[in-house]
């Protein structure tokens, strides 16, 4: 393979990791903000948020480390993801070679465009999933800012499972998270939950 093709492949590989890197950075930043807010809670109400915050921070840091330590990628992001990504976006030289081979074998019909490869479809699907994940995170942050934590959390779980799963799961998850938020954090642990613009 030529140097140009190799460099192109490595460039595409880094581009495909950009969305995951942004998500991992958001997890670390959110965990730090969460721990900072929890430090102002009463001693009794600080225990659970501290445990959750430090666990989230450790996992986020491990995910960030995997971006520079390839051996950790299979542990944090899945064993098959990185191995498939260099093939997910073929270089121009590879596309030209495949087209010439198909034409020589008579596999391509006259005047018809070659169908999209499954690897290219997989790459487009991965990018779309990353954008969807970022949109859900942005929606949760916006909902917390406008409605407050106690309202935004159950509403987020209801919306997420209603869109991604089923209505029954959405209702059950919203009720469970609402009870945990109000019953455990607000009442039992006396955690001052962030309020929004309206609640």
Image (cartoon, grey):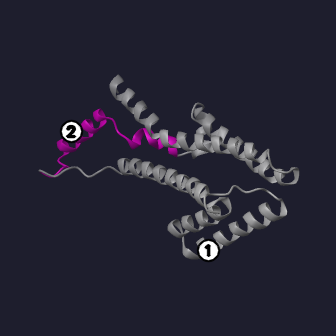
Whole-percent x and y of residue 177? Answer: 69, 66
Q: Which mark is residue 48?
A: none
Report the front residue among 81 and 179: 179
Residue for badge 1: 171
Camera-nearest residue between 66 and 48? 48
Instruction: Specify whether 95 is left or right of 125.
Output: left
Looking at the image, tell me whether mark 1 or mark 2 is earlier in sequence order. Answer: 2
Residue under circle 2?
A: 100
Residue placed furthest toward the bottom: 168
Residue extending furthest top? 3
Q: Where is residue 69 in the image (x, y as percent from the top left)?
A: 60, 31
Range shown magenta: 81-110
Q: Where in the figure is residue 155, as x and y percent of width and height?
A: 60, 66
**Is 194 placed left or right of 168 in the picture?**
right
Image height of 181 relative to 125, above or below: below
- Residue drawn 45% across the image and 40% down it: 16
The outermost residue toward the front is: 198
Dot 1 falls on a residue whose secondary structure is helix
| In the foreground, 4 or 130 | 130
- Within 10 Å of the Cα at label 2, are there few (<14), some (14-19), or many (20+) other Cα atoms? few
Q: For the residue labelled by badge 2, is the local secondary structure a helix, a strand or a loop?
A: helix
Residue shown at 63%/57% (left/top)? 196
Q: Quadrant of the N terminus?
A: top left
| Residue 2 showing in the rendered view | no
Q: In this view, does 52 lie to the left or right of 109?
A: right
**C-alpha gap between disc 1 and disc 2:** 55 Å
- The rendered magenta stretch, by its main secondary structure, is classed as helix
In the image, residue 174 sits, relative to residue 70, either above or below, namely: below
Crowding near the residue tagged with mark 1, few <14, some 14–19, many ≥20 C-alpha atoms within 10 Å: some
């Amino acid at each position: 393979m030529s140097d140009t093709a190799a460099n192109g492949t490595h460039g595409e590989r880094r581009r495909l990791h950009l969305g995951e890197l942004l998500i991992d950075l958001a997890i670390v930043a959110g965990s730090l903000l969460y721990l900072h807010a929890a430090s102002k809670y009463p001693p009794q109400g600080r225990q659970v948020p501290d445990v959750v915050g430090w666990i989230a921070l450790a996992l986020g840091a491990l995910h960030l480390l995997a971006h520079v330590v390839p051996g950790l990628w299979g542990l944090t992001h899945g064993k098959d993801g990185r191995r498939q990504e260099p093939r997910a976006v073929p270089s121009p030289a590879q596309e030209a070679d495949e087209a010439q081979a198909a034409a020589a074998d008579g596999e391509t019909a006259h005047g018809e465009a070659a169908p999209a490869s499954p690897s290219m479809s997989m790459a487009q699907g991965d990018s779309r999933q990353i954008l969807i994940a970022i949109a859900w995170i942005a929606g949760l942050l916006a909902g917390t800012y406008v409605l407050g934590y106690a309202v935004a959390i159950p509403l987020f779980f209801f919306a997420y499972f209603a869109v991604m799963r089923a209505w029954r799961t959405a209702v059950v998850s919203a009720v469970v998270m609402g009870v945990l938020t109000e019953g455990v954090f607000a009442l039992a642990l006396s955690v001052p939950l962030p309020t929004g613009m309206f609640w």
